[in-house]
Image (cartoon, helix red, strand yellow):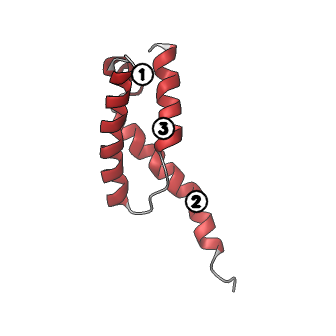
Amino acid sequence: MSEHAIEFLRGWIGEKVQCQHSPLRIEKQAETLAKECCAKAAEEGILLEDIQEEVGDIQELIASRLEEVAEENAPEAKSDKPSE
């Protein structure tokens, strides 16, 4: 995968991926973001094949990152509860 494609994907995911707590919402957002990512990559002259060669399915990668972000933010939600 070209360095340009790697930099693009990292930057794009970092900018677009935000916390979702519902698995159904994660799946839907991942689908939407994957389509946006592919369109933006094409605008910048980056071949989808270059990205997929390195990371596989973009939608799965984005869904995985969304899940990670949700897990990272889960302790924050728990800390709002009073301690016993």
What SS does tag 1 mark? helix
Numbered disc 2: secondary structure:
helix
Q: Position of residue 37 (x, y in %)?
A: 37, 33
Residue placed under numbered mark 1 in the picture: 54
Name which residue lies at 39% across and 46% down: 63
Circle 2 or circle 3, nearest the eye: 3
Q: Amino acid at mark 2?
A: Asn
Residue furthest to the right: 83
Give percent across and percent down for residue 23. 36, 59
Identify the residue shown where x is 44% and y is 58%: 20
Looking at the image, tell me whether mark 2 or mark 3 is earlier in sequence order: 3
Tag 1–tag 3 contact (CB < 8 Å): no
Q: Nearer the viewer, residue 45 or 24?
A: 45
Mark 2 = which residue? Answer: 73
The C terminus is located in which quarter? bottom right
Would you place residue 73 above or below residue 50 in this image? below
Q: Which residue is mark 3?
A: 13
Choose mark 1 or mark 3, whichever is in front. Answer: 3
Amino acid identity at mark 3 = Ile
Residue at the far bottom in the pictured view: 84
User: How far apart are the two marked residues, 1 and 3, measured between alpha carbons?
Assistant: 15 Å
User: What is the secondary structure assignment of the residue under circle 3?
Assistant: helix
Sort mark 2 into few (<14), some (14-19) or many (20+) by Cα contacts within 10 Å. some
